[in-house]
Image (cartoon, helix red, strand yellow):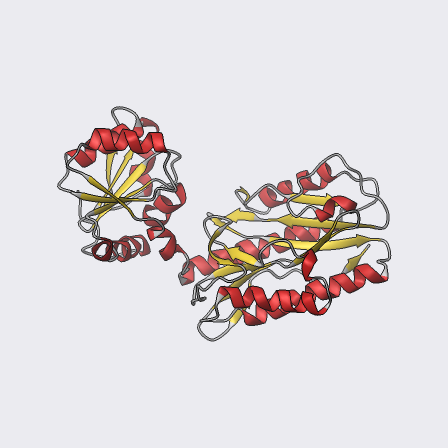
Amino acid sequence: MVSSFHFMKTPLHRRRHDLSLSFRDAKIDALLITSPANWYYLTGFTGESGALIVSRKGVSLITDGRFMVQGREEMSGVRILQQKHSLFESVGQVLRDSRFRRVGFDPTQITVGQFRSLRKAAGARVRWVSAPGKVESLRMRKDPAELAQMRRAAILAGEVVQSAIRLLKPGIREFEVGAEIEYQMRKRGASGPAFETIVAFGRRSALPHARPTAKRLGRNELVVLDLGVILGHYCSDITRTVYVGRAPKRIRLWYQAVLEAQTAAIAAAKNDAACGDVDAAARQVLADYHLDHLFVHSTGHGLGLEVHEDPRVARGRKRRLEPGNVITIEPGVYSAGVGGIRIEDDVAVHAGHTEVLTRAPRDLIEI
């Protein structure tokens, strides 16, 4: 394989080098990578099919003929091999002909059938070692360039959600709002949505993952808008809740509780804080309002090249936040027959402070 670590000229070379440093403890000679987000993180390759083999000496990408030219244009210091058979059979043959004896892989990212194909093609000489999360652990700590890109993605998401709020008039359908949101994303430069946009009116807002339907917006209803953009490969994620009409006292109280819970969790999301403690900060506020039983999901999740990454901000999680982590903070309350309220923002952890990347107003909006 071609050496790409001797001169670490770019962040991509440095990432591959940092990954290779973990091989000794894992007792592996090489690592097989099959996740598109992971191979992009390490090489810049944006093709749709392939597998990466990383060793301490270098990197090889196995892909099909559709992506050979693209691979040469996008990558530096990576050997590109065109598959001759199915992808995993070809990868196994490359490993069979290599000097590697112990090859790590992530069993959560390949199927049983793919693994059988790999093992058969590689032969008995290659020993397979479970080594999950190697690249993901590096991806949790964003470098300054990544943080700058995520800041831009978060600001764009805030602009889109505010434009969507202006559409909320009685009679409009959830489908229409969802379509306009995704149009505005692309018009403003995003490559697309980070996930299927959530638009939920009235009682449907009690469904945390509601998808747009033909339901029309009525008066005196809650509206939950949850959207994210992909900008320069990085994701953002924001949620705002609106009331169409004059919100009754109960809704105002619930909204205040969720806002205070989010504020408390953001304040707790500091360098070296346990993720479970951040989650607990939000839950304690809701418990003080006797609403914690209506909070049915975790407080947040990591964000980056994928919309759901480590670290997870959930009950009992021991992992501690580090500079470079980007997480969502998104407490909510949901009551069947009434509706739901969620407020979500993207938060970057720095050594000495916490930065809220999303910038849309968080106070209750009544229209």
Q: Quadrant of the N terminus?
A: top left
The residue shown at (53%, 59%) is 314
Percent x, y of residue 135: 34, 51
The residue shown at (39%, 55%) is 139
In the displayed structure, does residue 115 sit left or right of residue 343?
left
The residue shown at (35%, 33%) is 112
Can the viewer see residue 282 in this picture? yes
Q: Residue furthest top?
A: 85
In the displayed structure, does residue 339 sit left or right of residue 102?
right
Image-quadrant location for residue 361: bottom right
In the displayed structure, does residue 118 sit left or right of residue 191?
left
Q: Residue furthest left?
A: 99
Relative to residue 208, is residue 90 depicted above or below? Answer: above
In the displayed structure, does residue 76 sit left or right of residue 289?
left
Q: Quadrant of the C terminus?
A: bottom right
Percent x, y of residue 249: 85, 62
